[in-house]
Amino acid sequence: MRKITAHEISCAVAKSCIEANYKLSDDIVQAIKTSLDSETNERAKDVLERLLENLDMAQKEKMAICQDTGMAVIFVRLGQNVFVEGDIETAINEGVKTGYKKGCLRNSVVSDPLRRVNTGDNTPAVIHYEITKGEKIEITVAPKGFGSENMSAVKMLKPSDGEQGVVDFIVETVEKAASNPCPPIVVGVGIGGTMEKAAVLSKKALLVPINYENPDAYYARLEGEIKNRLNGLGIGPMGWGGDTTALGVNILTYPTHIAGLPVAVNISCHVTRHFSVII
């Protein structure tokens, strides 16, 4: 049994909050560059160039990529042979508090959804736990801005709706979102399980590198077809038209009930942030 202290966890989370907000992963950056090369709309090309300039400046100047530094969504893979000395949830939230203060990141969390009083330190985080084998803890911090989160959707389709129903729902969700999520976007899709399982899957799908080819050929094909349909909408970067509406589409699935077909679409702007550490 390996002991990991609450302080170690807090430090890892604080670092991850800052890193996630200052620098995008290489797959997202490369996707923007590739889109810039293939984009035919001059206004869209100008927007993509400015996005790349912004990313470069944020990294060089050690500042947030976007003013909306998000609500901290944290995925914890906890090894079953780990003993956490202290309260893990408190440790995670202390890390968020420290990271957002040290990184000069905006505090965007309110303590109650209706009374709307800001907590002042961007806590509490939304935390998802998974028990795994081994004696390590893997923590992924994925700050989620709400310009895109507000455009996400869950729908309980009928099994008879099938593949076409799923695809149509995804496309309709993105079309309805239009410029609101600051495209070009990354689309995470969760299919199966129950309502809440599909929603969590769609969030986790945003962590999958967009240059990663789905090992299931059926879903790899579906991801490609959906991406083509989304880019055919003509929404374009920041909604100004063009060929680049979606940088990537990732699908995660889970077994479901014979009577159900839950589908969740989690939209993220091009600032699809996440940073992982292993303790």
Image (tube, rainbow, N blue to C red):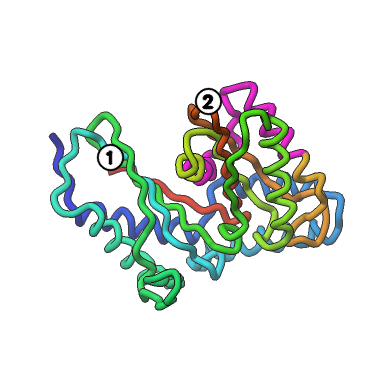
Residue farthest to the top, as pictured: 217
Q: Closer to the N terminus: mark 2 or mark 1?
A: 1
**Image position of 227 with respect to 145: above or below:** above
**Residue 159 locus on image (x, y percent):** 62, 29
Q: Which residue is mark 2?
A: 258
Q: Is residue 115 above or below residue 153?
A: below
Residue 62 to residue 152: above or below: below
Q: Is residue 166 above or below residue 151?
A: above
Q: Is residue 74 visible?
A: yes
Name the residue type under label 1. Leu
Disc 2/disc 1 C-alpha distance (Å): 32 Å
Q: Quadrant of residue 108?
A: bottom left
Mark 1: give few (<14), some (14-19) or many (20+) Cα within 10 Å.
many
Q: Residues within 10 Å of mark 2 (few under 14, many from 20)?
A: few
Residue 255 or residue 18, whichever sits in front: 255
Q: Give coordinates of residue 254: x percent, y percent.
A: 49, 30
| Dot 2: element | loop
Q: Secondary structure at mark 1?
A: strand
Type of amino acid at the residue the image marks with label 2: Ile
Segment colored magenta: 200-228
233 with respect to 12 (left or right): right
Residue 233 position, x and y percent, is: 81, 48
Please identify the quadrant where the N terminus is shown. top left
Q: Which residue is mark 1?
A: 78
